[in-house]
Amino acid sequence: MPSLYEQLEKQDSEYRHGSPAFLRTEPFEVPNYTGIKIAIVMAFILSLIALSGAWFLYSSLSSERSENKNQQLLQNEWQDEIGNLENQLEAYRGRVADLQSELEKNVAENQRLQRDVKEARALVQDLRDQVSEFEQRSVDLQSKLRNMEARNLPQAGPVEAVMPVVAPESGELEWASPADALPQETTQPIGTLPQEFKGKPLNAQILSVNRQFNFVVVNRGLQDQVRIGDRFSVRRGDDMIGEIEIEKLYDNFSAAAIHHESSQNQIQEGDEILTA
């Protein structure tokens, strides 16, 4: 396609050669469009520059907005994380308070246990002292018994004595020789009192009890017609609590082994002696 300049040149040539002479004029001067072209090019370049600047500004603004948005999101995440950490810290504080309370309770319990242990040790020491005292009393009693045996006192075997028996006809208490009394001896179980002896105590009592060697000392001896091998029931109040058998015999007292004894009421000093 011919340019504007070429079209104008063609029209001018046709006008000169085809028109009459009087109609001919001076050649048509084509206007200079170079400045316009330069202006158009400059305008285009400036437009590109402006467009590039606008795009740069838009990109910068978009990037800044995106960065601000990311920062806002990050700030929100940090705030949420801070909230979670504060909740965890509060929970840890509560746990620490619970542990502190439990520690105080354990300390108080430990102090109480220490007091109990101290009291128990004092009680054990007291019991040990009592055991030592009882052992010393037992040793003293055995020493007395050995001294009495060393006197060569007569035993009940060769001594002719009398003992209380119950008359079959009258039911009253009578004195008889050992030969007459032996066939009538009976043994009653612990916890029962013979009908003929109910309400008729022999005024005999337990003087001492030795648990280590399982024997007792009673205040009846040769002078009271007691023999070795005799068995007696032990009573406390209305309850029969045990049975003893004479093993060593002296004038005014004797030593007897404990054969039977109540598990709830053990024989002790002051218990009453009855014929078994």
Image (spheres, rainbow, N blue to C red):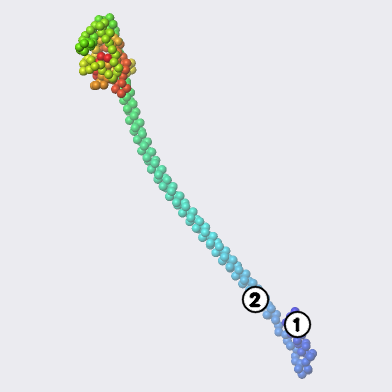
Q: Quadrant of the C terminus?
A: top left
Mark 2 surroundings: few (<14), some (14-19) or many (≥20) residues within 10 A: few
User: In the rendered image, is residue 120 in sight?
Assistant: yes
- Report the side of 60 relative to 134 (left or right): right
Choose between 167 and 178: the one closer to the eye.
167
Q: Where residue 1 appears, x then y in whole percent? A: 75, 79
Identified at 31% across, 21% down, the residue is 262
**Amino acid type at mark 1:** Glu
Question: For the image shown, how many numbered marks are present on the structure?
Answer: 2
Residue depicted at x 26% and y 5%: 179
Report which residue position mark 2 lands on: 43
Above or below, 220 against 34 in this view is above
Q: Earlier in the sequence, mark 2 or mark 1?
A: 1
* Residue 8 falls in image quadrant: bottom right
Residue labelled with disc 1: 6
Name the one closer to the observer, 10 or 229: 229
Q: As displayed, is residue 26 above or below residue 6?
A: below
Residue at position x 25%, y 16% in the image: 194
Q: Circle 1 — which element?
A: helix
**Of labels 2 and 1, the one closer to you:** 1
Q: Amino acid at mark 2?
A: Ala
Establish if 125 lies above or below 176. below
Q: Nearer the viewer, residue 146 or 180?
A: 180
Q: Is residue 167 or residue 27 the one in the foreground? A: 167
User: Seen in the image, is 189 located left or right of residue 91?
Assistant: left
* Quadrant assignment, res 153: top left
Q: Residues within 10 Å of mark 1 (few under 14, many from 20)?
A: few
**Marks 2,1: beta carbons within 8 A:** no
The location of residue 232, given as percent across then percent down, is: 27, 14
Residue 54 horizontal/vertical position (percent): 60, 70
